[in-house]
Image (cartoon, grey):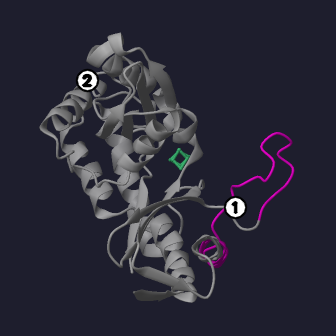
Amino acid sequence: MRIIHYEDIVEKVSKACQDVNFDIGSDVFDSFKKSLETETSENGKYILEQLIENAVIAKEERVPMCQDTGVAVLIVELGQDCHIVGGSLYSAINEGVVKGYSDGFLRHSIVGNPISRTTSTTYNTPAVIHIELLPGDQLILNLSAKGAGSENMSSMKMLKPSDGLQGVKDFIIETVRIAGPNACPPLIVGVGIGGNFERCAYLAKKSLFRPIGFRNISKEISTLEKDLIEEINKLGIGPQGMGGNTTALDVKIEMEACHIASLPVAINLNCHASRHKKIIM
Ligand code: SF4
């Protein structure tokens, strides 16, 4: 049994909340640069240059790359031979988010009451926490700061099994088309197929934690990912909706078994501020 201390989790989450907002990460940054070489529109190129400059300034000056510093979303891989002492894992993560958003002067974006919008909460909490219990004694915290613009343009639908592959593709492309500039493209398009109503939404979110350019290990799904990148980039939306052939930096798909009567599909859009960090403890 491996022991992990509450305070260590708080410190690591706090640092990651700041780092993730200041440093875009090499996979996203490199994909901006790569897209600059292939982008055909002058406006699109200009926006990509701005995104690159913005990312460099944010990293060098330790300032947020976007005013929307996001909801802290964590997918936790918890080894069943790992024992957390000093407090609950949920409390440790939330305390880390409070410390990180407070120490880093990051915007607190959570309202306690979604209807009245009047109650503010403590320093951007609660975080959205998903825990997967796995074999082993490691604790891995996959943290993201998820912006609302792209989250708002995400979509979920229970398709009919007879809609088939074409129905799935049409729904994904239509979701990106409707999102247009509102999701702050270029996008990372996360897709969950299968499971049930809530599971496919989780799969879509989980897919966004895979670094850009890493394809699904299934040949069938990786081919679908590549086809969709091509189709989406023909929409002409371009960087920040200014036109061009860089609408999506990547498409990631996770697929699972589902009921014979269902074909659940969820699309979780991520803006270009795709902020992820992996904490391994
Ligand atoms: S959607 Fe992303 S880029 Fe747009 S405002 Fe929100 S965090 Fe910033």
- State the residue position of label 2: 231
- Residue 131: x and y in percent read 49, 61
> Measuring 58% from the left and 36% from the top, which residue is drawn there?
152
> Measuring 79% from the left and 53% from the top, which residue is drawn there?
112
Give the amino acid at mark 2. Answer: Glu
| Residue 247 in view (yes/no) | no
110 in magenta: yes
Going by the image, does 154 lie left or right of 224? right
Task: Point out the residue furthest to the left here.
Answer: 219
Q: Secondary structure at mark 2?
A: helix
Quarter of the image where the C terminus is located: bottom left
Q: Residues within 10 Å of mark 2 (few under 14, many from 20)?
A: some
Q: Ligand 1 within 8 A of label 2's CB?
A: no
| Residue 237 in view (yes/no) | yes
- Residue 70: x and y in percent read 58, 55
| Image quadrant in which you'd find residue 116 | top right
Quarter of the image where the N terminus is located: bottom left
- Residue 160: x and y in percent read 41, 14
Going by the image, does 79 lie left or right of 92? left
| Image quadrant in which you'd find residue 140 | bottom left
Structural distance between the alpha carbons of marks 1 and 2: 37 Å
Give the amino acid at mark 1. Answer: His
- State the residue position of label 1: 108
- Residue 32: x and y in percent read 29, 50
Q: Nearer the viewer, residue 153 or 242?
A: 153
Q: Secondary structure at mark 1?
A: loop
Magenta residues span: 96-121
